[in-house]
């Protein structure tokens, strides 16, 4: 494992954490790193401890472009201008609003990303018109857009550092709603994993300081009671009440991650249908041991 970089020493946290060395450097945990650990501890070891980056896939490029463009949309959305467009000509209002909303997204020059953005523009056009008709435009724009948060936490006597970017926070009546944008296709089987991700963000938000929340224009006294996700490629959006068991699961996962560091053992979780999507399959020891007969044809 490589030595700490100057930046890691300055920040005081790292993925290359040395739990048995009292050097004041904390373990860094993000939604992505914890998710990678749950996917496969060995893949986590390659990516985060050894800093062996896998190939960048087209899906990753598309995802980043869509997220950046969506952030720009919310930053640029002007409610007053939208209302003016609606009042200008009710006959062509929907088309005009759609054209306006679509213009707020940053061009990506990526066909797959542009298709998803078209879907989002259509969805938000309908949402804007509905909010206007129901006098709910005050809730249309999120109260938080791409919020970068940090939190230092002591868990079972161990200091750790949480970090992450919350896609969106909306306010509904007396509470906040966490929303995550996903650029892949929706499958009902994804709910369990999605809940773990949302629970991580809820934990991160609640463990962050009041000063951070206020800096982003948020009210520290308003709780997060719901979370949800939006899959524009499948025209799927879902919101539910936060689940305590998912939050408990986050802490259990963190405990397993810390244990892996103390034991210096990150096991291989080989399953071909899953592992073919891993960017480290070409260097994975478990993959190399499978031989030619490991393919699952079922």
Image (spheres, rainbow, N blue to C red):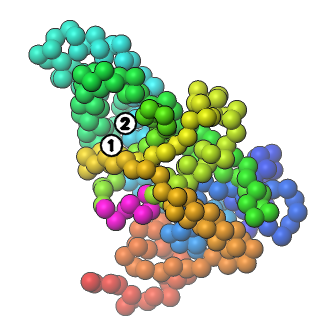
Q: Earlier in the sequence, mark 1 or mark 2?
A: 2
Picture quarter with the N terminus:
bottom right
Q: In the figure, 100 relative to 23: above or below?
A: above
The residue sitting at 81% across, 56% down in the picture is 25
Q: Position of residue 274 (x, y in %)?
A: 41, 73
**Which residue carries the number 2 mark?**
108
Q: Position of residue 62 (x, y in %)?
A: 38, 47
Q: Position of residue 72 (x, y in %)?
A: 43, 29
Determine whether label 1 and label 2 are within 8 Å by CB. yes
Is 20 positioned to the left or the right of 103 in the image?
right
The residue sitting at 61% across, 34% down in the picture is 221
Picture quadrant of residue 14? bottom right
Residue 125 in view of the camera? no
Residue 247 lies within the magenta run: no
Q: Position of residue 7 (x, y in %)?
A: 76, 47
Picture quarter with the C terminus:
bottom left
Stretch of the chain drawn in magenta: 188-194
Q: Could you give the CA–CA distance between mark 1 and mark 2, rounded to whole angstroms? A: 7 Å
Circle 2 — which element? loop
Is 188 positioned to the left or the right of 254 in the image?
left
Residue 191 lies within the magenta run: yes
Is 177 positioned to the left or the right of 124 in the image?
right
Using a 10 Å C-alpha cutoff, classify the residue at mark 1 as few (fewer than 14 neighbours), some (14 to 19) or many (20 or more): many
**Which residue carries the number 1 mark?**
113
- Identify the main secondary structure in magenta: helix
Circle 1 — which element? helix
């Amino acid at each position: 494992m490589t030595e700490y970089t100057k930046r890691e020493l300055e920040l005081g946290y790292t993925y290359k954490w040395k739990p048995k060395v009292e050097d004041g450097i904390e373990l860094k945990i993000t939604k992505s790193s914890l998710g990678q650990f749950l996917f496969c501890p060995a893949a986590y070891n390659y990516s985060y401890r050894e800093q062996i980056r896998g190939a960048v896939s087209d899906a990753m490029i598309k995802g980043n472009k869509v997220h950046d463009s969506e952030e720009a949309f919310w930053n640029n959305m002007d409610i007053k201008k939208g209302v003016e467009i609606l009042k200008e000509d009710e006959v062509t209002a929907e088309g005009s609003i759609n054209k306006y909303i679509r213009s707020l997204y940053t061009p990506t020059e990526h066909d797959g990303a542009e298709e998803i953005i078209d879907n989002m523009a259509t969805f938000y056009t309908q949402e804007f018109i509905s909010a206007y008709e129901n006098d709910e435009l005050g809730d249309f724009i999120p109260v938080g857009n791409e919020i970068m948060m940090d939190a230092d936490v002591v868990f079972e006597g161990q200091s750790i550092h949480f970090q992450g970017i919350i896609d969106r926070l909306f306010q509904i009546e007396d509470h906040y709603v966490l929303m995550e944008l996903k650029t892949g296709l929706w499958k009902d089987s994804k709910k369990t994993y999605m809940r773990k991700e949302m629970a991580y963000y809820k934990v991160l938000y609640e463990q962050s300081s009041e000063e951070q929340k206020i800096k982003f224009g948020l009210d520290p006294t308003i709780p997060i009671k719901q979370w949800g996700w939006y899959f524009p490629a499948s025209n799927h959006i879902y919101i539910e009440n936060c689940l305590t068991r998912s939050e408990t699961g986050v802490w259990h996962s963190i405990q397993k991650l810390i244990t892996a560091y103390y034991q210096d053992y990150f096991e291989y979780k080989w399953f071909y249908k899953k592992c073919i999507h891993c960017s480290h399959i070409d260097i994975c020891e478990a993959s190399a041991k499978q031989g030619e007969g490991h393919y699952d044809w079922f």
